[in-house]
Amino acid sequence: MGRSPCCDKLGLKKGPWTPEEDQKLLAYIEEHGHGSWRSLPEKAGLHRCGKSCRLRWTNYLRPDIKRGKFNLQEEQTIIQLHALLGNRWSAIATHLPKRTDNEIKNYWNTHLKKRLVKMGIDPVTHKPKNETPLSSLGLSKNAAILSHTAQWESARLEAEARLARESKLLHLQHYQTKTSSQPHHHHGFTHKSLLPNWTTKPHEGKPKKHTKSPQNLNFGTLFEFCKTMQINNSLNLRHLQCHSLR
DNA sequence: AAACTATACAACCGCTATACT
DNA sequence: TAGTATAGCGGTTGTATAGTT
């Protein structure tokens, strides 16, 4: 497991990209594809490391990127998914078409996180901060906090209840199928894009880098939680719009 | 008008995962 | 199986710009 030495080379340019550099990179990729990023800069006539080129392409130049302000729906999605997934920006980005993980991360850090803090919501746990005396907050803020928390809590409880029901069913099926020696099928968690990294794969003994679940949910609960939130998504977090503190 | 501060976001750094030899 | 190269990811920094004093 070696680290890439490509950025260590001296004489390579750093910092903001110029329009000329963008043009070179775009033109090259349009004609040849990016291929190996390491060899790309030289072929494209750029004095940059491959990593820098890759980032510039994936975060800025790629044609399928939507730029500009995030709309309310996107904001809600980010907040909900952040509550569920934590700082797993790439996972969040898969649910926001044409947005990059970098853009979402920046938007969270510069806008959404601050907004939640101002509302008295801990941006890590998505719960009201204990030390915030409710009496010091305005009534509308209280309502927003309660709504935010209640939505997540109810979704979580609903998910856990559903999981418990399914677990019972599963046990029942298990005993039924045992006698007929049919191969037992786990209830299909096919929503692959929502599968969290913190679930330990069967062949892996060592936990992965990202092992934290903000809600301390196990795998099954998390999946159910996702399903529930898709339903509850229609409820929206309108209070964020109503009580926007921008 | 100049100096200072805050904000937004592009870009970099350093790490892990994975593919390849 | 071990070593290496590369891609991907999240945290952090740097810089341009807007706003304030």
Image (cartoon, coloured by chain):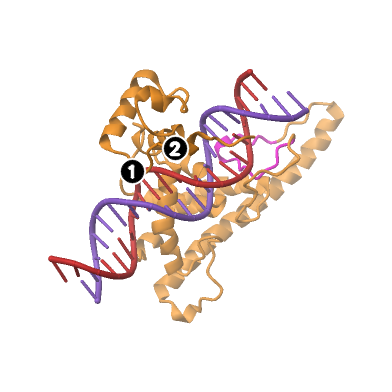
Chain colours: A orange, B red, C purple
Above or below residue A237? Residue A37 is above
The reply to whether residue A237 is in sight is: no
Using the image as rendered, state which of residue A199 and residue A12 is in the foreground. Answer: A12
Under circle 2, the secondary element is loop
The residue to which callout 1 is attached is: A16
Q: Residue A10 carries which label?
A: 2
Above or below residue A139? Residue A175 is above
Q: Position of residue A64 (x, y in %)?
A: 36, 32
Which chain does the residue under circle 2 lie in?
A
Q: Where is residue A61 in the image (x, y as percent from the top left)?
A: 34, 34
Residue at 51 percent of width and 79 percent of height:
A133
Question: Which tag, 2 or 1, sits closer to the chain's start?
Answer: 2
Compared across the picture, whether B17 is left or right of A83 comes to: right
Using the image as rendered, state which of residue A32 and residue A218 is in the foreground. Answer: A32
Is residue A239 magenta-colored? no
Residue at 68 percent of width and 49 percent of height:
A218
The reply to whether residue A140 is in sight is: yes
The C terminus of chain A, quarter of image = bottom left
* Amino acid type, residue under disc 2 in the picture: Leu
Residue at 26 percent of width and 33 percent of height:
A20
Q: Quick one: label 2, few (<14), some, or many (20+) residues within 10 Å?
A: few
Magenta stretch in the rendered image: A187-202
Question: Is the same chain shared between marks 2 and 1?
Answer: yes
Which quadrant holds residue A56?
top left
* Amino acid type, residue under disc 1 in the picture: Pro
Cβ atoms at labels 2 and 1 below 8 Å apart: no
The N terminus of chain A, quarter of image = top right
Residue at 42 percent of width and 41 percent of height:
A100
